[in-house]
Image (cartoon, helix red, strand yellow):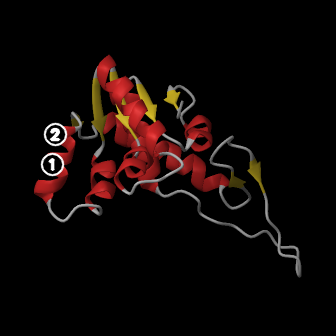
Amino acid sequence: MITAIDTNILLDILIPDEEHAHASKKLLEIYNEKGSLIISEIVFTELASQFLSEKEIKAFLSDTSIRLVHSNEKSLSLAGEKWKEYSKGRQDNLQCPSCGKKMSVHCPACNKNISFRQHIISDFIIGAHALVLSDLLLTRDRGFYKTYFRDLKIIQET
């Protein structure tokens, strides 16, 4: 079994996040025993901000048995397709990161819709990478991935 990991799971452990650190660490242990753990180049890049050098991040990945697996053309094309889908609908809706429910926010003075970009294309690369190159994704951002990557198996904190 190949398990992809989203940045938030690893940052829970590195920062550490009192609310999520134990559960995220446990998820990594469970899925490391079931097979291999991978990250995309986007996750690697986001993690690099937490280390003083490339040598340190490589040591962390080695110590945790996490491998960097580069995206391929199929995953990158899928990310672009899903980004286009998201971009068309984002002007009207905000999306809950937990359940995926979409909602609108309007200005109280003029009643015009206020739009926010909640996601950037790197989120779509992570999702497509996981869908194409792994069996499942460990993440806390369930609503977003469930909406745009319906076939992606998502594992959340236990």
- Taking depth in this image into account, of 143 and 149 the one nearest to the observer is 143
| Residue type at numbered disc 2 | Ser
Where is residue 34 drawn, in percent x and y?
33, 17
> Could you say whether the residue bearing mark 2 is in a helix, strand or loop?
helix
Q: Residues within 10 Å of mark 2 (few under 14, many from 20)?
A: few
Residue 130 visible (yes or no): no
Q: Residue at x 38, y 48 (%)?
A: 13
State whether residue 53 is above or below residue 22: below
Q: Which mark is residue 58?
A: 1
Residue 151 visible (yes or no): yes
Q: Quadrant of residue 31?
A: top left
Q: Residue at x 33, y 57 (%)?
A: 46
> Could you say whether the residue bearing mark 1 is in a helix, strand or loop?
helix
Q: Which residue is mark 2?
A: 62
For the C terminus, give its image quadrant. Answer: top right
Contact, CB < 8 Å: mark 2 with mark 1?
Answer: yes
State whether residue 140 is above or below residue 94: above
Distance from label 2 to label 1 (Cα)?
Answer: 6 Å
Q: Residue at x 89, y 82 (%)?
A: 109
Where is residue 17 drawn, in percent x and y?
47, 53
State whether residue 120 is above or below residue 149: below
